[in-house]
Amino acid sequence: MRTPVAFLIFNRPDTTKRVFEAIRQAKPFKLLVIADGPRKDKPDDEKKCADARAIIDRVDWDCQVLTNYSDSNLGCRRRVSSGLDWVFSQVEEAIILEDDCLPHPTFFRFCEELLDYYRDEEKVWHIAGTNLTPISDLKSSFLFSRLVPIWGWATWKRAWQHYDIEMKLWSKYKHSEDLQYFGSQQQNVYQVFEDNYHSLVDTWDGQWAFSCVAHQSLSIIPKTNLVMNIGFRSDATHTKGKSKFAYIPVRGLDFPLVKPLNMIPNQEFDEKFLSFLNDSEFSLVSKIKQFIRKTVL
């Protein structure tokens, strides 16, 4: 596979190994690995982080491996954002996987083909691997959306350059009529962005979602769910315990891909997806954290 893969790891060698094996099957010619450092108050972290990094040494195919490892713990917000800044200082486009996002084999081809096809389409910023609420009668292989799922995704340097961890546009955007697009979920979307703006959660992806939404860009959502989250457990940073979002089955796509007839966001899907995220077993605070960190806006 000619498309570079960015792999974000931390302190879970077992999930890291499973996702690494999926990457190994795809055999990318370039692998860029981002790792956070051990936490000072967690004595086991040093060994766990080392064990996770050792898995990268198992690359046994023709592959250029680049690493960006932090000696200290930066946390999700600073480590992922700085790591992806580094990735896009090295390459023009990439497929991005975290250590708990296990992809179906067709995920890689899906991303690679669409990265190539929409490379010069300025309106498209994000290619997602996650679809938690598939539309059964969808005729095309994917749809366009205003949402930004990050359980396995891909993008271009041209889009990532707009990422702003401080969300400087929020103070103006939150008064715009564009939020009305999200219909009955408008207040939930507002609250997620407001909490991100005030750094109430140590996260990076709410800021990416906001950058995409504020610029009215389009995301691509596959017809089927292509990535399973295997990270919901007690040692997770944010996704602790049981959840309806965990271990959602994956199903591969058929090729050649069938493209939508037009490049218009599917508002029905977006409201359905957001409703699914918010109709959960979690309290409001937990939902916001879950929503921001690991599912998306």
Image (tube, rainbow, N blue to C red):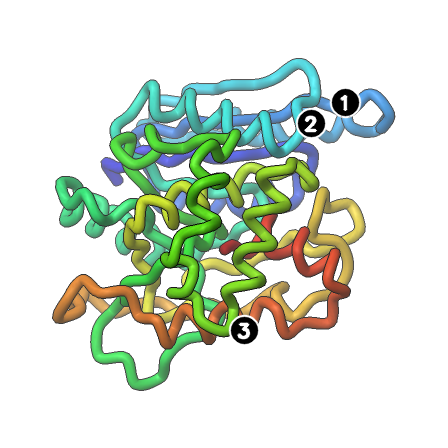
Q: Residue at x 27, y 55 (%)?
A: 110
Give the vertical position of 233 relative to 133 (above or below).
above
Amino acid at the residue labelled 2:
Cys
Badge 2: residue crowd in 10 Å (few <14, some 14–19, many ≥20): many
What secondary structure is marked by label 2?
helix
65 or 214, which lies in front? 214
Residue 180 location (% of width, % of height): 41, 64
Query: Residue 275: which numbered mark, if any?
Result: 3
User: Do residues under tags 2 and 3 come within 8 Å of each other at their CB atoms?
Assistant: no
Query: Residue 231: which numbered mark, if any?
Result: none
Question: Of tags 2 and 3, which is closer to the observer?
Answer: 3
Does any portion of residue 290 appear in the rendered image? yes
Q: Residue at x 29, y 25 (%)?
A: 91
Q: Which residue is mark 1?
A: 46
30 or 85, which lies in front? 85
Q: Which residue is mark 2?
A: 49
Question: Of tags 1 and 3, which is closer to the observer?
Answer: 3
199 lies left or right of 182: right
Amino acid at the residue labelled 1:
Glu
Give the vertical position of 237 relative to 34 (above or below).
below
What secondary structure is marked by label 3?
helix
Q: Residue at x 29, y 30 (%)?
A: 157
User: Do residues under tags 1 and 2 come within 8 Å of each other at their CB atoms?
Assistant: yes
118 or 106, which lies in front? 118
51 lies left or right of 122: right
Badge 3: residue crowd in 10 Å (few <14, some 14–19, many ≥20): some
Residue 296 location (% of width, % of height): 52, 54
